[in-house]
Amino acid sequence: MNLLNTIRFDTYNELDVTVRTRLRKDSTTAPDFDPSARFALQLLDRLPDICARHGEPAVEFVDKGFAFRSHEPERSSTGIRWIQRTVGYEIRFLLRVMYRAATMRRTDVSPPSSILEGEWPVCSKCLLARRIWQYIGHAIVLAGIGLLIAVLIGTQISTSDHLPVPLGLALFPGWFPCGLVVATLLYQHSANLVLFRPITNHDKVWIRTHPGFADAFESDGTTSEAR
Ligand SMILES: [Zn+2]
């Protein structure tokens, strides 16, 4: 393996693999286009038939765009630093918004997302995990709807004017908003089939990969650059 193209993280047994990207042409024609503010990247390299996360044979290539958000641009020499919108990122973002709101400071609750599009190899483990997270998300959404229906029926047949306190708390703030936030995070987690390092360059992106994927990528002779 050419170690110039990969960086080993022994703690997690992960390798960073560099893939080539470019700005999507139709996204650069707008008169107010500013690639440091928002962009759409396309993957140029054909990835091997190996799942990047598990290093197992891919069962399909998923055509998908991953979302990133701008973060601390002053830390990057190229002026951009975009973080993948993983569950960890979203929780930190939510906490930051809540903290700023609590301290009466203004914050943009919905900053723009940039995307990285491509065809990504995924294995059966990835697809199973995605289904499980989605089912748990569905279960949370449906549980709340079931609870609402139960409350509506209960108020029709009950002589009391008040909801039982536990039932009320289960609905609010239990299901709304807490349960729905958790369901949204689970849907987001299920969609992040590939994990990336922060994007600091429009021409190349680093994927966090299983060593099996890195080996296959290198042996394919893909022309990637050293980090
Ligand atoms: Zn996989």
Image: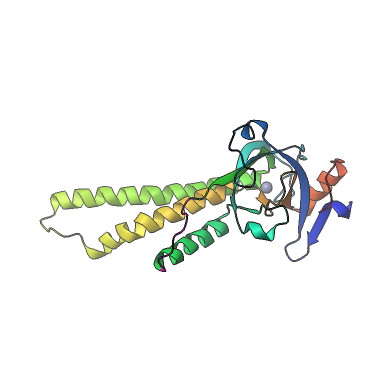
Of helix, strand and loop, which mostly describes the magenta segment?
A: loop
In the image, residue 105 lies in the stretch drawn in magenta: yes
Towards the viewer: 89 or 99: 99
In the image, residue 170 lies in the stretch drawn in magenta: no
Residue 62, given in percent of the width and then of the height, sits at 64, 37
Residue 137, given in percent of the width and then of the height, sits at 46, 50
Give the residue displayed 20% in from the left and 48% down from the top: 153
Based on the displayed image, in which of its 4 quarters is residue 174 positioned?
bottom left
Q: Is residue 64 left or right of residue 184?
A: right
**In this picture, is 148 found above or below 48?**
below
Towards the viewer: 135 or 90: 90
Residue 29, given in percent of the width and then of the height, sits at 63, 31
Q: Is residue 36 left or right of residue 149?
A: right
Give the residue displayed 45% in from the left and 66% down from the top: 99
Residue 54, given in percent of the width and then of the height, sits at 71, 51
Quadrant showing the C terminus:
bottom right
Furthest-left residue in view? 159
Furthest-right residue in view? 2
Towards the viewer: 79 or 120: 79
**Figure colour scheme:** rainbow
**In this picture, is 30 found above or below 16?**
above
Furthest-bottom residue in view? 103
Q: Is residue 5 left or right of residue 43?
A: right
Which range of residues does the magenta coloring cover? 103-110
Give the residue displayed 70% in from the left and 52% down from the top: 200
Give the residue displayed 17% in from the left and 52% down from the top: 155
